[in-house]
Image (tube, grey):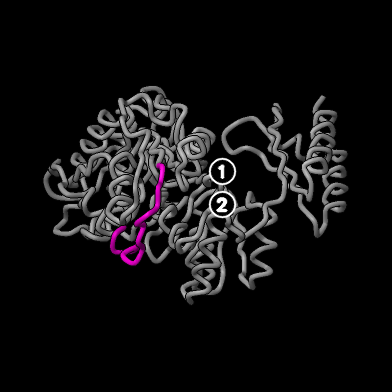
Amino acid sequence: MARELFGTDGVRGVAGDKVTAELALALAAAAVRRAAPGAREGRPQVLVIRDTRESGSMLESAIAAGAAAAGADALLGGVLPTPAAPLLIRRYGLDLGVVLSASHNPYRDNGIKFFGADGDKLSDAVEEEIEALLAEPPTRAGGPVGRVRPLHGTLEDYLRDLHTRFAGLDLGGRDVLLDCAHGAAHRAAPEIFRRLGAAVTAVGTDPDGRNINDGCGSTHVEALAARVREGGHDLGFAFDGDADRVLAADRHGRVVDGDELIALAARHLRDRDRLPGNGVAVTVMTNYGFHTAMREAGIEVATTGVGDRYVLEALRERGFALGGEQSGHIIELGFSPTGDGIAGALLALEALDGRDLAERDAMEKLPQRLVNVPVADRDAALADAAFAEAVAREQAALEGRGRVLVRPSGTEPLIRVMVEAPTDEEATAATDRLVAAMQAGIA
């Protein structure tokens, strides 16, 4: 069956349009039937958490109703970062987790993503089976309808797990700015940083249902960078709406992306014999400079498609524990099987070991140019022979010094053309030539 609803990170779209209460109810019931068959005493236990969007409470009610109608108990954990879900599922031995969030998207969007009893996001195959069940008459998992009740203390549970992982991290004397994007990190992030001793200035902590990601957070990291520089802070971290990704800025206001944060963590964990398999997993978007730095450090790199679920698959296959994406998803598998922005920020500070982020030296980024080219037919554009020859020429010219990456957008009618080269000028010139070749082929 073709995937019509699920994308690379659950179901996502405009709330009330694509992501409706009716869809949420049906998906919850189908997910209980498919993904929670081995429930305790015949009654699956389903966690539901959300971010701060105004549509979240509507969808929460629908998910809870769908789960209960299918014979499960719905446990409402409230507003929490997405990475709290696998930790809570494991802590309480739950059968299924549902996170309601559209991550870094504007407030009008919302999303539904599922986690299994092992704390992992459901596989593509299971999501397809859930979609297929939507066409069948609803049935209960067994026994009477379930109950809907609050699950108290979830924020403290998540903070306790963070504190346990970073118990040896002393942030005394650190002046840290946090941008919580008016999202799910707005309580958790400032609190754990303060408990670890940091002097915290927090912005983006007043959600009103519509201001999530609005000119703030990791999708607008330039705002954080300016505030860090102008405010004289030591460094800053920006989270996205559901707090599963993080970007940073040093005291000079220079942005530090996921590649650099992962490079810092990899060297740190390797030096302390805490990097299983002596390797990391990253995506095709990772900067060429990262690969160079890891090769020089003797650290193996596995490269995956875009999406933290594919990073997780590679970690499991290779026996690695650290991976992530340039966008700021950072997974430390010993702590959680999904990206955790708050844990990623604390891991970066642990790796710095008191040093200044402005003096980081884990990797040297190559200049990068990325252009999105609108196309009517992505497959036809990529199949053009003249364009393929142009790509081959540019790749050959940059061999050993940089790279070319051309890939279709997974959600829009675009082809993404990216070039990394030793200088800005060379990256720009090569990108311009490739874009011109593609536009000539689709004219």
What amino acid is found at the position of numbered circle 1 in the picture? Answer: His
Please name the residue shown 57% across and 49% down the image.
326
Q: Let me know if residue 167 is in the magenta part.
A: yes
* Residue at numbered disc 2: 358
Asked if the residue under mark 1 is in contact with the one under mark 2, i.e. CB atoms within 8 Å, the reply is yes
Read off the magenta span.
Answer: 162-177
Task: Tell me if I can see residue 347 in this picture.
Answer: yes
Of residues 228 and 402, the one nearer the viewer is 228
* Residue at numbered disc 1: 252
The crowd level at tag 2 (other Cα within 10 Å; few <14, some 14-19, many 20+) is: some
Please name the residue shown 32% across and 37% down the image.
51
Of residues 129 and 118, the one nearer the viewer is 118
Along the polypeptide, which appears first: circle 2 or circle 1? 1
Q: Secondary structure at mark 2?
A: helix
The quarter of the picture where residue 167 lies is bottom left
Of residues 397 and 269, the one nearer the viewer is 269
